[in-house]
Amino acid sequence: MSVLVFPYDKVQIGELSITPKRGGGLITLPNQCAHRNLLAIEDGEVIRCKDCDTQVSAFWAFLRFSREYERFKEDLEIRAKEVIESEKRGVILKAAQRVEQAWRRRKMVPTCPHCRQPILPTDGFGNSCIRKIHAVEVSCDRPTAG
């Protein structure tokens, strides 16, 4: 048995704000249509289920819409966070791809952005590391060439 209740304290859609008064839930009995495909008939202001052709209460449909809207909104927020995290990882990957492209050139070698001296494979590129915070401090002290 599933129960349809207003699961949120408040639903906000643009300037429209809806706050429910708590009470009993709307019940869908087992082995009955869940009324997922609704048809709003403007003439007569009736809402019918397209699957079972049953008329449903406008209030019930409203609660159903509100619940689905909030669920959809939460999913979008989660996806937006995932996209932001993916873009952050993408920046790192793009930097690594640029370094790889620079090293794959046949007739040119990458140069130091500060002194413009060539960086050769014999220089031991990548054999040693420095913490990022120290690297920023050191690179800011160096004058840029150009």
Image (cartoon, helix red, strand yellow):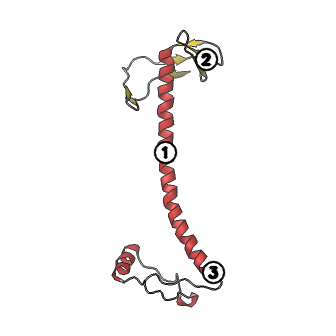
Q: Quadrant of residue 96?
A: bottom right
What residue is rendered at 53% in x and 89% in y?
123
Label 3 to label 2: alpha-carbon separation: 64 Å
Residue 68 picture location, percent across and down: 51, 30
Residue on which disc 1 sits: 78
Near mark 2 (Cα within 10 A), the count class, few <14, some 14-19 or many ≥20, is: some
Indicate the amino acid at tag 2: Cys
Q: Which mark is residue 94?
A: none
As shown in the figure, which amino acid type bears the numbered disc 3? Arg
> Is 38 located above or below residue 128 in the figure?
above
Three-letter amino acid code at the position of disc 1: Ile
Give the alpha-carbon distance from disc 1 to disc 3, as whole Å. 41 Å
The quadrant where residue 142 appears: bottom left
Rendered image: mark on residue 105: 3
Q: What separation in Å lies between label 2 and label 1 (alpha carbons)?
A: 31 Å
Quarter occupied by the N terminus = top right
Kindly identify which residue carries mark 2.
49
Q: Secondary structure at mark 1?
A: helix
Is residue 49 found left or right of 65 in the rendered image?
right
**Residue 29 percent coordinates (x, y):** 57, 16
Residue 34 visible in rendering: no
Label 2 or label 1, whichever comes before in sequence order: 2
